[in-house]
Image (cartoon, rainbow, N blue to C red):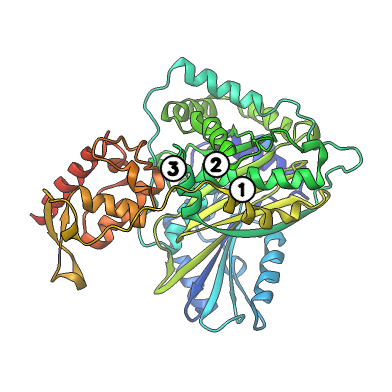
């Protein structure tokens, strides 16, 4: 277990804002939909209790005034107040109502700021578990870490920032932070001032549509999500917000800066980067290309290192001043974030089939939108200011915008192995139930996984293609790692799979590791 150090400037800023504006809820969380018989409340409390000793996010909280707060430790928080249940009447509409109410329900007033709710009775062989936490103690990746600890089958994948960053990376980071806090005068309409009253809605879209469209043009799933959001906001602005029509809408995206050794640390290890939404662009292709170009710098490992250094070195008061500027009406912006949970979740033997994230709405902001990919579906949560006409229609408009995404020409399905080119790879016995079969680890095998399970375009995956040219993003790398581990027992981490330069190098790595597995 990692003992928390001094709170980050983001932690203290969140904590101070919560004390200064207690009516602005900072509750974030996720709703897990499960198949099976709901556990008893006692069983769920026992399950959560068994993880407390190695989960600092569940036993630590900030205590003290504003920016002077420090971490306090409560090794045995009262689970009678933190693990609770609601028994609902039959019908999914009752679940929807309960979830909407629960998002706004206050967190425990004392001690660690989190709770877990069991929701059952609305359907046979189905139930939901809702995990909620205060943003001062858990960010998005922290929430994934908590989910993985409580309901996961394997540790959450981690990313390692670059070891060095040049002057250009630091200058780009500082420019980006200053750019997002400039005056934009998009949302400060005196006739329709933002009230802070919020609407919350969700939309579910196929992850592969976001991913296929973006990776074919050099982007990733987050780019696909932002392009869809841009298309939806373009339609909305034309219909309901003329001062935002045919213009780029200011937005920020959250960038994870958490290091591998900090995977269990409470608090916030992220920063924000500009992600202007090209709602002025008339074509879906044009919007996607502009999004990919705008987010490229934020994905650069050198920029990640620079962002983390800035976060570590900037005094809390300076960071607080910058963040506070973002909550003024003339500088307000749309907040976006994207998360992905790659490995299956479950409670004991009951699988989690669907996830719904939810987030908070910063003061004076028009909308806060978070997307989470899990099990082939990306669930998007829209928290919007109720004063803006028609903004609660974003889920429907996003469904329409997904249909507008560019599609690559359909490739014929690959035939049986006998129809493919001769292979030169490693033959590995499949584990467990498939022991009577053998799998050949070669280029065709790896390509088949990436095309059929990863939904990548087949034409871009050639032997000499770089991983970027082949459209392999972090999500594809993680899925390949999972399939190799779960089907064949080949253990290769996400970070190892991301290192090869070309597809041929990647296949060689997999084949070499397969040989070691045989031995």
- In the rendered image, which residue does mark 2 sit on? 268
- In the rendered image, which residue does mark 1 sit on? 135
Mark positioned earlier in the residue sequence (1 or 2): 1
Residue drawn at 41 percent across, 53 percent down: 410
Nearer to the camera, 74 or 440: 440
Closer to the eye: label 3 or 1: 3
Are there few (<14), some (14-19), or many (20+) residues within 10 Å of tag 3? many
Residue drawn at 32 percent across, 58 percent down: 413
Nearer to the camera, 51 or 120: 120
Q: In the visual, does 81 lie left or right of 160?
A: right
Q: In the visual, does 300 lie left or right of 134?
A: left
Mark positioned earlier in the residue sequence (3 or 1): 1
- Disc 2 is placed on an element classified as loop
Mark positioned earlier in the residue sequence (2 or 3): 3
Q: Position of residue 103 (x, y in %)?
A: 68, 61
Q: In the visual, does 213 lie left or right of 470?
A: right
Q: Position of residue 149 (x, y in %)?
A: 43, 58
Q: Are marks 1 and 2 in contact (CB under 8 Å)?
A: yes
Would residue 59 be visible to someone looking at this image?
Answer: no
Where is residue 120, by image quadrant?
bottom right
Cα–Cα gap, marks 1 and 2: 8 Å
Residue 314 lies, with reference to residue 42, above or below; the image says above
Closer to the eye: label 2 or 3: 3
Would residue 447 be visible to someone looking at this image?
Answer: yes
User: The C terminus lies in which quarter of the figure?
Assistant: bottom left
Cα–Cα gap, marks 2 and 3: 29 Å
Residue 357 lies, with reference to residue 17, above or below; the image says below
Residue 215 badge: 3
Are there few (<14), some (14-19), or many (20+) residues within 10 Å of tag 2? many
Cα–Cα gap, marks 3 and 1: 31 Å
Q: Position of residue 191 (x, y in %)?
A: 92, 41
């Amino acid at each position: 277990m990692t003992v928390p150090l001094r709170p980050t400037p983001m932690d203290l800023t969140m904590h101070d804002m919560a004390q200064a504006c207690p009516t602005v809820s900072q509750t974030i969380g996720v709703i897990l939909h499960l198949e099976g018989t709901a556990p008893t409340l006692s069983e769920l409390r026992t399950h959560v209790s068994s993880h407390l000793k190695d989960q600092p996010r569940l036993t630590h909280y900030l205590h003290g005034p504003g920016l002077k707060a420090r971490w306090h430790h409560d090794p045995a928080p009262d689970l009678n107040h933190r693990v609770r249940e609601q028994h609902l009447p039959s019908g999914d509409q009752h679940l929807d109502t309960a979830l909407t109410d629960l998002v706004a329900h206050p967190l425990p007033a004392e001690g660690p700021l989190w709770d877990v709710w069991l929701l059952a009775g609305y359907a046979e062989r189905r139930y939901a578990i809702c995990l909620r936490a205060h943003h001062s103690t858990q960010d998005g990746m922290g929430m994934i870490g908590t989910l993985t600890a409580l309901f996961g089958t394997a540790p959450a994948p981690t990313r390692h920032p670059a070891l060095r960053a040049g002057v250009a990376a630091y200058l780009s980071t500082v420019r980006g932070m200053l750019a997002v806090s400039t005056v934009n005068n998009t949302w400060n309409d005196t006739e329709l001032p933002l009230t802070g009253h919020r609407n919350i809605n969700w939309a579910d879209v196929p992850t592969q549509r976001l991913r296929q469209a973006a990776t074919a043009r050099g982007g990733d799933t987050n780019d696909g999500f932002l392009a869809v959001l841009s298309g939806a906001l373009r339609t909305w602005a034309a219909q309901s917000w003329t001062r935002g029509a045919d213009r780029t809408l200011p937005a920020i995206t959250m960038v994870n800066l958490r290091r591998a050794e900090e995977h269990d640390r409470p608090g916030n290890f992220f920063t924000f980067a500009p992600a202007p939404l090209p709602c002025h662009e008339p074509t879906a292709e044009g919007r996607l290309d502009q999004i990919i170009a705008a987010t490229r710098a934020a994905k650069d490992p050198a920029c990640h290192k620079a962002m983390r250094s800035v976060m570590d070195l900037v005094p809390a008061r300076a960071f607080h001043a910058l963040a506070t500027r973002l909550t003024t009406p003339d500088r307000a912006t749309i907040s976006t974030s994207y998360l992905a949970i790659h490995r299956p979740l479950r409670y004991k033997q009951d699988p989690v089939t669907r996830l719904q994230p939810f987030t908070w709405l910063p003061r004076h902001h028009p909308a806060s939108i978070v997307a989470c990919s899990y099990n082939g579906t990306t669930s998007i949560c829209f928290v919007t200011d109720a004063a803006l006409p028609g903004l609660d229609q974003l889920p429907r408009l996003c469904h329409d915008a997904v249909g507008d995404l560019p599609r690559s020409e359909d490739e014929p399905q690959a035939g049986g192995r006998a129809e493919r080119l001769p292979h030169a790879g490693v033959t590995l016995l499949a584990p467990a139930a498939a022991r009577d079969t053998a799998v050949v680890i070669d280029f065709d095998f790896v390509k088949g996984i990436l095309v059929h399970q990863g939904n990548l375009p087949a034409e871009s995956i050639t032997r000499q293609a770089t991983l970027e040219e082949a459209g392999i993003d972090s999500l594809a790398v993680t899925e390949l790692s999972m399939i190799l581990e779960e089907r064949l027992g080949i253990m290769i981490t996400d970070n190892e799979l991301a290192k090869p330069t070309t597809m041929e190098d990647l296949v060689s790595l997999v084949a070499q590791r397969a040989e070691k597995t045989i031995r």
